[in-house]
Image (spheres, rainbow, N blue to C red):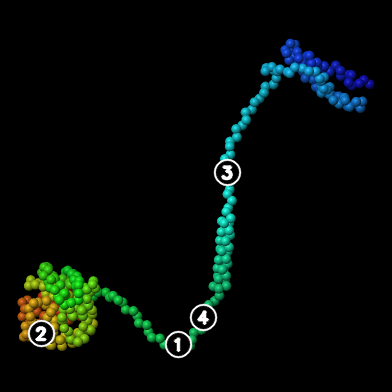
Amino acid sequence: MADPITQKEENIVIRTMKGDLERLSNKAPEKEKKPEPTPFIPISPISQESRVPISQAPAPSIKTEPKRFSPTIGPPILVIPPKEIAEIPARPLFKTTPIWLKISGIGLGTILLVLLGLYGYWKIFIQSQPITPTPTATTTQPTLPTPTPTATTTAPIKFFNKLPHKEVMIDIPSKTPAVLINALKAETKMEEAPSSVKLIKITFQEKLITTEEFFNLMSIFTPNNFLLNYENDFALAFFSQKEGVRPILILKIKDKNIAESQMAEWENKTFTSDIFPLFLSENKLPKSLGSFKSYLFIDQPVHYLNINLPFTSLNYAIYKNFLIFTTSSAGMFVVLQDLTGRSVK
């Protein structure tokens, strides 16, 4: 049987170093050869060297000059530029939580838990328990009734309906008769519209004086316990008529029956001389005076007395719970028409 190696010798191509050098220097053009497949060499038990292909056998060590490749020969070199990668912004490093903040958070959480526990205990075990009424004693000590506190200030009394036409406040510097009388006389000299009524309010240290204080400062004498039947508020007004100013005084009665009996008794005694300071006149009261007379005005009884002064008379009337003093008949007519709401036809 023929050796397989000898049968394939015609397919073996032997290359020498000289031929390679001539090809590189372009002295002898090389014919294009089709690549031949590597011969298959079967494994033979004769020698292990036959496993190595002939093309891989080491070439003889011959010193040669370095190869110079032509730029036109050989495969093209593909140069791939490096890909630019966008820079990723660096994130700031997380700061570690201070130890004191951790301790504070733990403490607050502990306190919150304790409070929730106490609230739950109170809600469940204390608030939910029924309240047992405490037994009361069968005998109690009697207690006195507690007096209800009275109001320090009361609403001012309304002495007129549509009147007055004007209102004046006089604040006296001291509570003396001379100071008050001089202030009132100065006010009478103020010119006002005819038949007009001007209300005079008297204060001391910006506080209205009482009825008793007014009677004392004006030196008007009254019977014993007379003023106890009247309120502390009063109305002093000036009626302007052609002949001059005529004062008006109105008191608020507590008991009308007592007021009627008081006036009937006072009228027959010293009423005229006691009330005369209200006239604010420089003239003196005549010694001989007649007795009081009465008349009806708008169905209201009026008591009057002429005192021998021009266009002046002493008048008083009781209408409902008001005691009215005037120093002229015209002044009484104006007040009664205002209080009753009726006019003379």
- Residue at x 57% of width, y 61% of height: 107
> Looking at this view, is 46 or 306 the one in front?
46
- Label 4 to label 2: alpha-carbon separation: 76 Å
Mark 2 vs 3: CB contact within 8 A: no
Which mark identifies residue 292? 2
Please say if 288 is above or below 341: below
Q: Earlier in the sequence, mark 4 or mark 2?
A: 4
Report the amino acid beneath label 2.
Phe
Question: What residue did someone put label 4 on?
Answer: 133
Q: As drawn, is 195 to the left or to the right of 30?
A: left
Report the amino acid beneath label 3.
Arg
Nearer to us of marks 2 and 1 is: 1
> Looking at this view, is 272 or 109 the one in front?
109
Q: Secondary structure at mark 3?
A: loop
The C terminus lies in quadrant: bottom left
Q: Earlier in the sequence, mark 3 or mark 1?
A: 3
Please say if 85 is above or below 268: above
Question: What residue did someone put label 1 on?
Answer: 140
Question: What residue did someone put label 3 on?
Answer: 91
Mark 3 vs 1: CB contact within 8 A: no
- Residue at x 55% of width, y 75% of height: 129
- Label 2 to label 1: alpha-carbon separation: 64 Å
Q: Earlier in the sequence, mark 4 or mark 3?
A: 3
Residue 111 place in picture, x, y as percent: 56, 64
Residue 159 place in picture, x, y as percent: 20, 75
Nearer to us of marks 2 and 3 is: 3
Nearer to us of marks 4 and 3 is: 3
- Residue at x 67% of width, y 17% of height: 72
Report the amino acid beneath label 4.
Pro
- Label 3 to label 1: alpha-carbon separation: 84 Å
